[in-house]
Image (cartoon, helix red, strand yellow):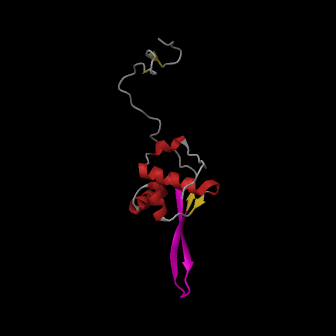
Amino acid sequence: MILGERFFKLSNALFCFHLTPIQFTVYSFLVSSAGRKEKCWPSMKTIASNCHCSETAAREAITALEQKGFIRRVKRYQDRPNGSVRQTSNAYYIQEQPPLPATWGHTTSRDSGVIYEQDEGERSKPSAAGQESA
């Protein structure tokens, strides 16, 4: 399933949750599939194919995303003519973004020197506020 020219948004804070690349990709696929209704039901084969991973890796990513509170998985069942019930698929509900991890925003620095930026073709200049370019 190619979504064409449609776009979807993800919060920049998503990078603070230490998702693995596969978890990030699977979450992105589910969000793009769900659209505004925040619900989708792709098969594991479809998820794996679109995320370029194995079905096992996709399953593990779904489990991790569910445990971290990004999605809610609801098993879907079908009644059979013989009276038995079988699971047909899962529905995935995109949840509100979980609270930021307690460690977010804390960085350790070995020194407190001035950070310099350099654009191609420009001389080095301090990036601290209030300092002029060199």
Vertical side of 134 occupied by 72: above or below: below
Instruction: Between residue 25 and residue 69, name the one nearer to us.
Output: 25
Looking at the magenta stretch, what is its main secondary structure? strand
State how many labels appear: 0
Residue 112 lies, in percent from the top left, at 40, 21
Residue depicted at 55% across the width and 75% down the height = 77
Residue 90 part of the magenta segment: yes
Determine the image quadrant of residue 34: bottom right
Vertical side of 22 occupied by 126: above or below: above
Q: Which residue in the rendered view is the most extreme toward the right?
A: 36
Residue 125 lies, in percent from the top left, at 46, 16
- Residue 49 visible in the shown view: yes
Determine the image quadrant of residue 108: top left
- Residue 95 visible in the shown view: no
Q: Which residue in the rendered view is the most extreme toward the bottom?
A: 82
Residue depicted at 41% across the width and 59% down the height = 60
In the rendered image, which quarter contains the N terminus? bottom right
Vertical side of 123 occupied by 109: above or below: below
Residue depicted at 51% across the width and 51% down the height = 28
Instruction: Between residue 118 and residue 17, name the one nearer to us.
Output: 118
Residue 61 lies, in percent from the top left, at 43, 57
Give the residues drawn in magenta, as a range: 70-91
Vertical side of 41 occupied by 78: above or below: below
As drawn, is 60 to the left or to the right of 99?
A: left
Residue 28 part of the magenta segment: no
As drawn, is 4 to the left or to the right of 45?
A: right
Residue depicted at 57% across the width and 61% down the height = 40
Residue 23 lies, in percent from the top left, at 44, 52
